[in-house]
Image (cartoon, grey):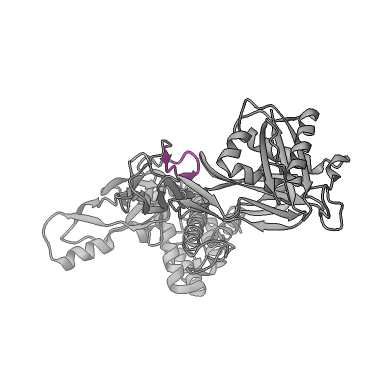
Amino acid sequence: MDSSWKNLQIRMEAAWNMRTTPKTKRPKTGDIISSAHSLDWNKKKVRQLQQQWNDEVTKLVSDRNEAISDVMVDILTLIRMDIKSASSVLISHDAAKMLWEKAYEYGHANGFTDGKRIARQLISKSSHKSQWPRAFCTGLFVLGGSMKKHIVFPFILCMCMFLTSCGVKMTGVKIQNVGELTTGDRQSLVLDYEFNHDGSDKEKEKVIDKTQLIFSSDNMSVANIVGDGKTILAGTGGTATITVRSLDGTIHDSINVTVLARPKEFSIPHELTLTLGSEEVSTITPTVQPEDFDYSGCEYSSSNEGVVTVDQDGNLTPVTAGTASVYAKLPKLNIERECKVTVIAPIEKITLSKSDASINAGEMVKLSCTTYPETPDTSILQWSTSDSSIATVDASGTVTGVGKGIAFIKVSYKDVYAVCAVSVNKKESETKTDGSLPQGSGAHNDWYRHGDSSTFDALLKAVNKYRQDNGIPALQKASSLTAVANQRADSMVDGSNTASGYKELLAQNGRVAIDVAQAWYNTDYYRSLMLDSSVTTCGIAVDYDGDGCSMWVMILS
């Protein structure tokens, strides 16, 4: 066997055996991709994955067809060269193509054994000692024989060149316009025939059947001729010229075919939340692959313009609170994507389920919040902690104690917020240094005068946190004011209740420093003292009465 034909055989077999389906299975409608997301999200994700799977099929088919086309180019070239070598006649590309198609047709019709017999009979009947090279005949025979479903055999040129004539003759042909195609489309070409005179339909059909018309493409990667020889398979984006001509070249026509390439990816956000009256401009911008894909023809629309409108640049304008779907569509490619848009009224107030809490390190407490007006999308709320070494908080409002101290947990939307003061204590097995009071057991329990400053520090830290949050400098401890605070606490215990002459913050029965600071902050009068920018120093004291009731004093100056 000629080595050139053997190589073509191997290449053609490899091309036909190329994979045309992805290795992964196509997702089924109703599949759950993620149980952590909504049913709507899963439906959209399945549709997206199905589209990606279909796009991959299109590419694989296109790759296989391109590989087959490449082999065919070389086959036709080899046919022409073999014939020229034997007869000094250089036949046209189209004539070589017709020979191949006739061999293909006979191979399919008769099978391997009969095909071999017919080929030998035709060769023996050719004029004199055959003008066709044995390499050509044998090459087509062996190539087709090993391909099983794609068996091809040689066919003598004279069998294809002679056209049967009759009274009615074909004088022209026109290809009907196929319009724009997209990657993977198949389109059969339709012809309008012209004849030398009006004959019967039967006569015209006979002429059409016996006239050898060959279709070709000048850019097979864009539009390839496949199957029955007159079907277009759309490949990569671009333009190609499709030509039809008779074997003798007397009849011909051509059309230009435009193929619109399908993007590997075309997506928009699945969900968006807009706020009425917001100055921020929200725009739907598609994500595409490849990045240079031209989506300038994208059309945007809203399912309810009473809720949200969209212009043709993808800019969204909220109209009233509610939900609507915004669509981005590429009409020529029949691609459409959906974004669910929720429009909410501006949040004017946020409240928390707790204004303060006390937990041990390693423990958790769940905070819930309420917005006014109520928002259906709580994901727009931001949770934060003032000190992650003391306490952390997740996106759902769950606070976890980390280390001793006070952390302020904040939930906010833009400039609206609420705060919960969380005091984190050591575990019971550890020494208490979180600022909570010891149990009082008698009058004038003066523990606070003997170096245990943890309670004082905790109270001062909590008060200063409120001041700093409001842009006011922190207070500093002053020993002189501490002495005044001690006297004031004693007067509260012994019942004389003598005023100190200073600005003062007073509390009874508090057990934890942060609770005392929070109570002061929630009282209008005490809050005004805490946030007085003219106050710079302080003194702190705590005492018990005879019943074990705690008395808290902060003197300000």
Which residue is located at x 33 percent, y 41 percent?
312
Q: Quadrant of residue 385?
A: top right
Query: Going by the picture, which residue comes out furthest to the right?
Result: 450
Q: Horizontally, is 260 left or right of 432 in the view?
A: left
Instruction: Describe residue 405's horizontal placement relative to residue 517 as left or right.
Output: right
Give yes or no for residue 291 being in the magenta stretch. yes
Let me know if residue 390 appears in the view. no
Image location of residue 203, percent across then percent down: 17, 65
Q: Position of residue 96 (x, y in %)?
A: 42, 52
The residue lying at 55 percent from left, 40 percent from top is 524
The quarter holding residue 241 reads top left
In the image, residue 312 sits, relative to residue 45, either above or below, namely: above
Bounds of the magenta span? 281-293
Q: Dominant secondary structure of the magenta stretch? A: loop
> How many numbered circles does the render carry?
0
Residue 51 percent location from the top left of the image: 47, 58
Identify the residue shown where x is 83% and y is 58%: 428
Q: Quadrant of the C terminus?
A: top right
Residue sitting at the far left: 198
* Residue 320 pos. (x, y %): 33, 48
Q: Quadrant of residue 204?
A: bottom left
Residue nearer the viewer, 549 or 90: 549
Front one among 131 and 169: 169
Left or right: where 337 falls relative to 477: left
